[in-house]
Image (tube, grey):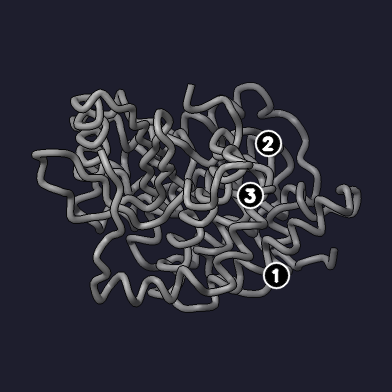
Amino acid sequence: MQPVPSSGPDLESVGAAIAHATATLDSLAALGEDVEDEWQYVQDLSDAWLTRWREVGAERGAEPLSPAVATAIVLLSAEAARITDPHRAIDWLSTFPQAVLVALGERA
Amino acid sequence: MRFQDAAPDARAIVYAGIQADPLVGRAATLLADATWEQRVLARAAMNGESTEPEPWRAMFPTLFAADVDPVARDRSEAILAASLEVADRGEQARSQFRGAIVESLTELLLRRRLTGSPATTVRRERRVLFDGVRGEIHPYDVTVELPGAALAADCKWGARGISADVLHQLDDARTHAADEEERLDVALVIFDAGRSCEVRLDRQTAPRDGTRIVSLESLDDLASGRWPA
């Protein structure tokens, strides 16, 4: 696998990865809220996935992160940040947390 | 209870072209044997912005790292390539391709459960008719037309596709079948996380107890003998 240059914060632990991803999830939710009919769903979806991430953080927060996983979290966040359409943001509100969990070796 | 081909309207004719695209069949075949992680990769890449494979490989190190089993890595590469082809079709087309892929995947998995049955046992775009009941306009995406073990399934790319209309149509079909003393299992196949589906369902008041929700994590149940009971 060719190394992919990444820019962004150095994520040294699972807890740091989750904190970084949480900021991205908040941005996706803010964008998704533009779809007025789905405001409640956006809140519920965001809360549900944050709850799942917090469970992971509570168990593994201090665990060191490998460089490959840290890069994955940064790139996944960057990919999510490229979404500008509110409807796609709602789709990514579900996709992004799953991808983060895959990177961390967790189940959904 | 009887099954009937849906009358093709203009939308259906256009959509049939998408369904017949070789990319749909290729992606569905790959996803039928995929792991949950590989299906998440497909979901992300088909609806992502990056159309080059390299960033995706780095986003999914558990699938592409050097120490991953080569057979599994090759499958991940093939899934990624197909997913990026879908993404590359443009915003409107990719949405139609994704839907068609979920339908095709559902058909493939159901056929595995019914190995040995005639090919016409599993059908696409079919209506279910009942005596004295006005037929639904929208056909079911996939049906299993086996006496005593019939199934009607609707397929959705994401949990957001779960709506009151869809739940009502499925439940109505199930109860009308029961009124005729027939068994019709109904399912919603969602290419999304079960957690997201539950969030969507939590605020629905439409009946759902008799509808099986098949999510990204439980897709393989379609191919196994675990369901219907």
The answer to whether residue A49 is seen in the rendering is no
Amino acid type indicated by mark 2: Val
Numbered tag placed on residue A14 in the rendering = 2
Whichever of labels 1 and 3 marks the residue nearer the N terminus, that label is 3
Q: Is residue A16 above or below residue A67?
A: above
Residue A11 at what x, y percent from top left? 70, 46
Residues A65 and B39: in front is B39
* Image side of residue B109 versus residue B62, left or right: left
Label 2: state its secondary structure. Answer: helix
Label 1: state its secondary structure. Answer: helix
Q: Chain of mark 1?
A: B
Residue at coordinates 71% horizontally, 53% vertically from top-left? B60
- Real-space Cα distance between discs 1 and 2? 25 Å
Residue B13 at what x, y percent from top left? 33, 75
Amino acid type indicated by mark 1: Pro
* Image side of residue B97 versus residue B176, left or right: right
* Image side of residue B25 versus residue B214, left or right: right
Residue at coordinates 60% horizontally, 48% vertically from top-left? A99
- For the N terminus of chain B, the quadrant is top left
Label 3: state its secondary structure. Answer: helix
In the picture of the structure, the residue carrying the numbered disc 1 is: B53
In the picture of the structure, the residue carrying the numbered disc 3 is: B32
* Image side of residue B171 versus residue B216, left or right: left
Neighbour tally class for label 2: few under 14, some 14-19, many 20 plus, Cα within 10 Å: many
Q: Is residue B115 above or below residue B84?
A: above
All told, the count of numbered labels is 3
Of marks 3 and 2, the one in the foreground: 3
Amino acid type indicated by mark 3: Ala
